Amino acid sequence: MKKSTIALGAIAAAVAIGYTTYNSMFSTEAVAVDESVLATKLSEYANAESFITAEQLKALMDSEEDVVVIGALNPLRPDSPIAGSHTMWRGDYSAQSDAYEFGGMRNTTEEMEALLGHVGATPDSTIVVYAAGSHHDAARIFWQVQNLGHEDVRYLDGGLNAWIGAGYATGNANPPVKATSYVAPNPSAQEETLATLDMVLNAQQDSDWVIIDTRGDDEFNGTTTVSGAYGPGKIPTSVHINWTQTVNGDTTLKTAQELKDLYGDLIEGKNVIAYCQSGVRSAHTALVLKEVLGAENVYNYDGSWIEYSHEHYEQNNQDVKVSNGNS
């Protein structure tokens, strides 16, 4: 597993402003959720087996089942992980720095196999992913594990927030485990979920496709360029639905009916490509469309705005047009 170096920044920040202040400012907020309401909501999702509640996860971890829990936790934040889980961050499951001319891309199948083997997973394991606060990073790992053809991967609704709110133990993460030689059951599964630049360009000319921009208003309007991108703007013909519209104030997912009201007419009978800055927020939208609403032919554009803006602004690719950007 690649080692993250940005944790040093967290230490420096904590020293600079005082650990107590730092912890209170940035640690995960506990949220109290009604377990029965949550379980009922998840049961109404198209693929209910792709989701799990904190109570259900606690019972699973207490059983003798083969379960591997992975937290996508930013080491800059003083989050205390779910006890017994394994933690990783974007640098661990992203491409090597020299693999592309730009950042934010997923790592290779072989690297994912090594990553899962390191935490003791097998193709038969139940893999549960979670994050803190904004849970799109859990959805990103969900997408990458699912791309391996792994059958049983689940998203913890409410993530670490709901786990803490339920009063369950945190800390003592990354326990020593016996490494495995994980082999992806079906790595070609990514062909059914991965959007490429060529697909995005073709989709702009095809009424059977819809492109959803899941970023914030300023990014979509071209008034902000997030670090890593090469210029402002949006993909032409894309429709803006910020990924945050899919979650409640307590960070849990909205109901199937609410999400159908949000997306139903737009995606009805369409092939869908979701994108954001680097395929993280859009992975969350793809999860919602596929696993909650049961939509088919939903693709996450891994390169997203970073790759697209690189082609337009750096490569001067005449086929790659930009709206709301610089001429």
Image (tube, rainbow, N blue to C red):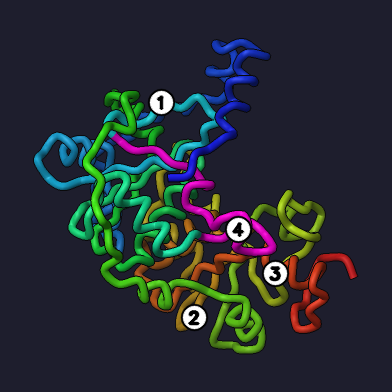
Question: Could you say which disc has been placed on residue 17 in the image?
Answer: none
Instruction: Choose the circle earlier in sequence order: 3 or 2.
Output: 2
- Binning the other alpha carbons within 10 Å of mark 2 as few (below 14), some (14 to 19) or many (20 upward) gives some
Query: Label 1 is placed on what type of residue?
Result: Ser
Mark closer to the observer (4, 2):
4
Q: Nearer the observer, disc 3 or disc 2?
A: 3
User: Which residues fall within the magenta stretch?
Assistant: 85-106
Mark 4 or mark 2: name the one nearer the start of the chain: 2
- Looking at the rendered structure, which numbered label has been put on residue 271? 2
Query: Which of pointers 2 and 1 indicates the residue nearer the eye?
Result: 1
Depth check: give the residue in front, 243 or 73. 73
Label 1 belongs to which residue?
80
Q: Residue at x 49, y 75 (%)?
A: 267
Q: Sequence order check: which comes first, mark 4 or mark 1?
A: 1
* Dot 4: element: loop
The answer to whether residue 41 shows anywhere in this view is no
Callout 2 amino acid: Asn
Q: CA distance from mark 2 to mark 1?
A: 40 Å
Callout 3: few (<14), some (14-19), or many (20+) C-alpha neighbours within 10 Å? many
- Disc 3 secondary structure class: helix
Q: Residue at x 55, y 11 (%)?
A: 20
**Which residue is label 3 attached to?**
308
Q: Tag 1: Cα neighbours inside 10 Å, few (<14), some, or many (≥20)?
A: some
The Cα atoms of the two marked residues, 1 and 3, are separated by 36 Å
Label 4 vs label 2: CA separation?
A: 20 Å
From mark 3 to mark 4, how far is it between C-alphas? Answer: 10 Å
What residue is shown with label 4? 278
Q: Does the magenta segment cover residue 93?
A: yes
Q: Earlier in the sequence, mark 2 or mark 1?
A: 1
